[in-house]
Image: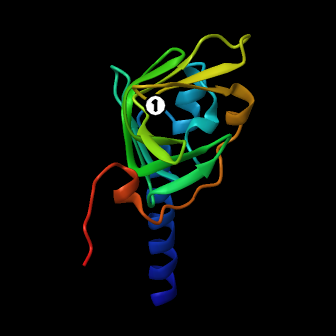
Amino acid sequence: MSLLLSFCFFFLFFGAAVTAASGGDGGSAYEVLRSHGLPIGLLPKGVREFHVDGEGRFEARLYAPCTAKFESEVRYDASIVGTISPGQIAGLSGVAAQDLFLWFPVRAIRLDDQASGIIHFDVGVVDKRFTLSLFEFPPDCAPALVAESQSGELHNRL
């Protein structure tokens, strides 16, 4: 009897995990990116939960903050939110890009067109350009060790 209960619990847990990762309302994070003409590698591996509404507002949840390496480093918070539309993500929060040892929040991501092969990260003071080929596949993401200080908050430790 306990074996049967364990077996049922496993399938209930596994089914809930698969539903959470796919979002349940519009497909997986990677399918939604692709359907809007964006590369799936804009989000790292390990999206555990994803939701998007009819207006394109989305939230992607990772297991923990992490950092991925492209031409420079990109840091992802555990929660990433924004509004997706064809070829772009606006109102983005939860993503930061490193430039000259400083971390800048990425506010928007824009793809000019597929033929240009360039994707733009709007970090406020600078428009960072990356080759589209860097984002063909979701990157591995290493745990972020100092997430608070990278996001711009100052802490004094005694």
Count of numbered circles in the view:
1
Instruction: Identify the secondary structure beneath mark 1.
Output: loop
Task: Residue at 47%, 48% (x, y): give it.
Answer: 76
Above-or-below relation of 118 to 80: above
- Judge the density around disc 1: few (<14), some (14-19), many (≥20) Cα neighbours within 10 Å: some
Q: Is residue 28 visible?
A: no
135 left or right of 145? right
Image location of residue 118, percent across then percent down? 67, 19
Report whether residue 130 is seen.
yes
Which amino acid does the dot numbered 1 rest on? Gly
Which of these two is toward me, 119 or 11? 119
30 sits left or right of 78 in the view = right
Q: Which residue is mark 1?
A: 26
94 relative to 31, above or below = below
Tell me the colour scheme of the image.
rainbow
Can you give x and y, in whole percent of width and height, for residue 21 in the image? Answer: 49, 50
- Residue at point 65% right, 47% down? 139
Q: Is residue 2 above or below residue 23?
A: below
- Quadrant in the rendering for residue 64: bottom left
Q: Position of residue 22 (x, y in %)?
A: 50, 44
Residue 46, quarter of picture:
bottom right
> In terms of depth relative to the viewer, which is nearer, 28 or 57?
57
Q: Position of residue 95 (x, y in %)?
A: 44, 41
The image quadrant where one finds the C terminus is bottom left
Up the image or down, 158 lies above or below 102; here it is below
Question: Which residue is depicted at the point 36% across and 49% down?
Answer: 151
Residue sitting at x 44%, y 29%? 123
